[in-house]
Amino acid sequence: MAQVDFPNILPKEDRLGMVKSAPELLDHGNMAARKLALEIITRSITAIDSYALTKEAVKLSGHSLTVAGQHYDLTRVRHVYVVGAGKATMPMASALEEILGLRISKGQIVVKLGQLRPLRRIAVTESDHPLPSREGLEGAESIVRIANEAGEDDLVFCLVTGGASALLPFPVQGISLEDKRRTTEFLLRVGADVNEINCVRNHLSQIKGGKLAEKIHPARIINLVVVDEIDRKVWGPSAPDNTTFEDALDVLRRYGLWNKVPSSVRQYIKRGLRDQSLETLKDYDFAKFQIQNVILADNVSLCEGAEREARRLGLTPLILTTSLRGESSQVGAVLGRIALEIESFRRPARVPCAIIAGGETTVTLGPRHGEGGPSQELALAASREIRGSQNIVIAAIDTDGTDGPTSAAGGLVDGKTFDRISNAGIDPLRSLRLHDSYNALAASDDVIVTGSTGTNVMDLNLAIVTDSANLESFNGLGKDDGT
């Protein structure tokens, strides 16, 4: 079977090829520290691409299939099916086709718009993200047909990566796709985090919250998961959901949305509070299923990869957290102040250093807002704090390559970014207020553009703090050009 080409999944020797905007990012400001940041980003993301990790985890020798150390005798398997969804699922499905070839009887995955590649045994549907679409519903219906077809002698691979919840809408009877879309949009606008959004969506779905596993039963399930959640658990439609209808109600009330969401949503949640049979499946419900769970990558492995790369480059690495949460502008300001503390007092890390923080921040949108995403807003907010510094660079990137509804993956700023934006005729403070980080950073050539990266493990944030006296020790990385 021919190998599918994923141009953004790079060989390890390719240094900055993933970052399409590298030429613009490296022609101004603190160029040495900027290149250090891009080196760390590129190497750490490339090391956890979902295609390579799937090939590592799944091995076939004759009729013997080995998945993360567990063996399956394919002479005892009638059909192998592949289903899944998410922003890093396309490379995983490609890898499985290369490994299993004609042994795959049928498959269906749903990916984000622009990620489709031709596969021979697995059908691929593109859908909108983060708001659900008709195409996603059609893909979900196809997955349910496969699940219902699977029997006790069959094996079903479930591929789950970030974005799966939005890409697989299958609302319960009585709730329309438009009702589900409006509810999701309300939650996004108020800055609800991914766990809160998924809590609500799971309780409005026919397949989320473990219900897909119930439909696949009694076939055996192999969950291959790239974790895009802070708690590092196996998640998705074929995994347990230990939230409740009470939790979903609490989320909507906490954000003042209970009386704003469609009446069909309120009615179903009220019904679920009374009828336990409508609840999502919990850990104890999964005791009857035959499931192997394999986590291929998560934000911890990403941050640890960034730590190793920083050390290789001669920097002192410090992982602040792998569970970062909060409003992007506030988190950016805090990261900027930590970098200034290091620059001034050499604490809590020794210069030159790389401060690493992974997780997922959010943006609470007002009635008027511009273009941007959480990572770009974090970077823009940080640029305000480090304004005037000669030694600090801060990068923030969404690891799947798309930050919010933009073509950018994130932003890379230094002590001169704030003034470059102002000199371009844009008020950076107004851009922060209006959540227009993309246009502000684009005006200063500080937008990171990668395209699809082949993975998705939340966000990576870096603060590089150097000393102007030792920049030349980083061979070939350049100096501040004074602009």
Image (cartoon, rainbow, N blue to C red):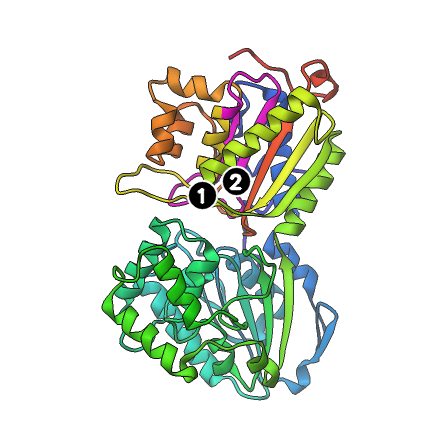
- Asked if 337 appears above or below 62 in the picture, the reply is above
Looking at the rendered structure, the kind of residue marked 1 is Asp
The answer to whether the residue labelled 1 contacts the one labelled 2, judged by CB atoms less than 8 Å apart, is: yes
Q: Nearer the viewer, residue 389 or 256?
A: 256
On screen, residue 17 versus residue 197, left or right, reads right
Q: Residues within 10 Å of mark 2 (few under 14, many from 20)?
A: many
In the rendered image, which quarter is residue 51 located in? bottom right
Q: Quadrant of the N terminus?
A: bottom right
For the record, the magenta segment spans 385-414
Residue 175 visible within the image: no
Q: Which residue is mark 2?
A: 397
State the residue lying farthest toward the left: 263
Relative to 51, is 340 above or below? above
Q: Is residue 396 a member of the stretch shown in magenta?
A: yes
* Corner quadrant of residue 170: bottom left
212 drawn magenta: no
- Secondary structure of the residue carrying numbered label 1: loop
For numbered disc 2, what is the local secondary structure? strand
Q: CA distance from mark 1 to mark 2?
A: 7 Å
Q: Which mark is residue 453?
A: none
For the residue marked with disc 2, what is the amino acid? Ile
Residue occupying the point 42% across, 70% down:
246
Q: Report which residue position mark 1 lands on.
A: 403
